[in-house]
Image (cartoon, rainbow, N blue to C red):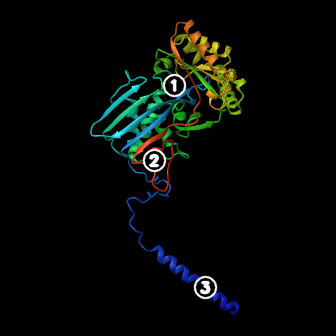
Amino acid sequence: MLNDAGTKVAVALALSALVYYVGSKNTTKPAASSSKGPRKLSLVQGQGSGFGPKDSVTVRVPATTANMGPGFDCIGMAVDIWNELTVERADAFSLTNEGEGSDVLPTDETNLIVVGLKAAFNAAGQDLPLLRIHCRNRIPFARGLGSSSAGIVAGIIAGLVIAGHELSVLGKEELLQLAANIEGHPDNVAPCIYGGLQLGIFTDDRWYSSRVQFPSTMQCVLFIPETTGQTSVARSILPKKIDRADAVFNIGRSAILVNALRNGNYKELRHATQDKLHQPQRGAEQYPHLFPLVDAALEAGAHACFLSGAGPTVLAICSGKSGDIFTQVAAERDETKVADAMREAAASVGVQGCVFITNPEHRGAHIVRVSPKISDHLVARYEGDITDL
């Protein structure tokens, strides 16, 4: 039997041999990767995932409702209505639209999708290549539901994917910077990017967003007039300066709005969505249907009702949804009664339009399809379409 000294010497020799063996294995050159092997992903921070440039991509982006009463230019929420954008490398530039706004949206470089694409390629340090662009628009155009922000965000994301370039999110929110700098404010682009309810401010020389949780039982009833509303006109109506009392009015209600949604206290929303900075002015000079619809919706059982963005859409918040509404007794919810009341109120002031009943959307912009595919035979990135794996 070995003594303690002999044992120590044996262990030391064994360890030395092991270190030599491991070192010898690590200095050998790696075998050339097979064309069918897994894609290597960079593990160095800031180096990206290694997905590389793509030939085509399809992106989905949600509608958004901004302001929500008192949160002028700083509160917004994603809504379950979607646009879909497909961008492909091509031999010549082309842009086509179908659906909402297809008869008026530009098909040249002034389209906000192209503006977003250019911003993405500029961020990647690349020239904009020739692209074939097709837009399937389901978000009503120029109705206060974030169609402009949807175009900007979709263009940026599609451009980043085609270019094979990624942006930092944590602590920088570089995608939000690009989008908000084009749009001029974050209340639509933030929920379009991230989904959910977002607060947006400008601080420390950058745009900053913060997510607010809200109950899953919420529903949105939207009255969408046939006529459009230009944001530039809606903004020109507003005074250059405001009274301190009006500022205090909105600050207090913005705080209650966030607290009520986070805690699921629907009863407070009636008061929390009141406003003195933009709705009274727009209701008096631009949208005579606004307050008749607000009053009708609240009377019919809505928890809140307000002008969506710069209008002309008016959005009411209802509750009671549990699971899929097609499997739930309708009497447990008020959205149909609220929709009928809003439609009748609009007709009484001579405003024609349609009603959408939908939900707040927790998910933001996302990629539906990409070519070449991101998944390999070892790791699948599943986004809902099995053919993309």
Q: Earlier in the sequence, mark 1 or mark 3?
A: 3
- Give the percent coordinates (x, y) of residue 232: 46, 20
The three-letter amino acid code for the residue at tag 1 is Leu
The label shown at residue 96 is none
Whether residue 133 is visible here, answered yes or no, is: yes
- Give the percent coordinates (x, y) of residue 105: 38, 24
Which secondary structure, mark 2?
loop
CA gap, disc 1 and disc 3: 72 Å
> Is the Cβ of the residue at disc 2 closer than 8 Å to that at disc 1?
no
Indicate whether 136 appears above or below 9.
Answer: above
The three-letter amino acid code for the residue at tag 3 is Ala
**Residue ranking furthest to the front:** 327
- Give the percent coordinates (x, y) of residue 92: 27, 37
Using the image as rendered, state which of residue 160 and residue 119 is in the foreground.
Answer: 160
For mark 3, does the 10 Å Cα neighbourhood hold few (<14), some (14 to 19), or many (20 or more) residues? few
The label shown at residue 12 is 3
Residue designated by label 1: 145
Q: Say which quarter of the image contains residue 222.
A: top right
Residue designated by label 2: 166
Q: Identify the residue shown where x is 45% and y is 23%.
A: 141
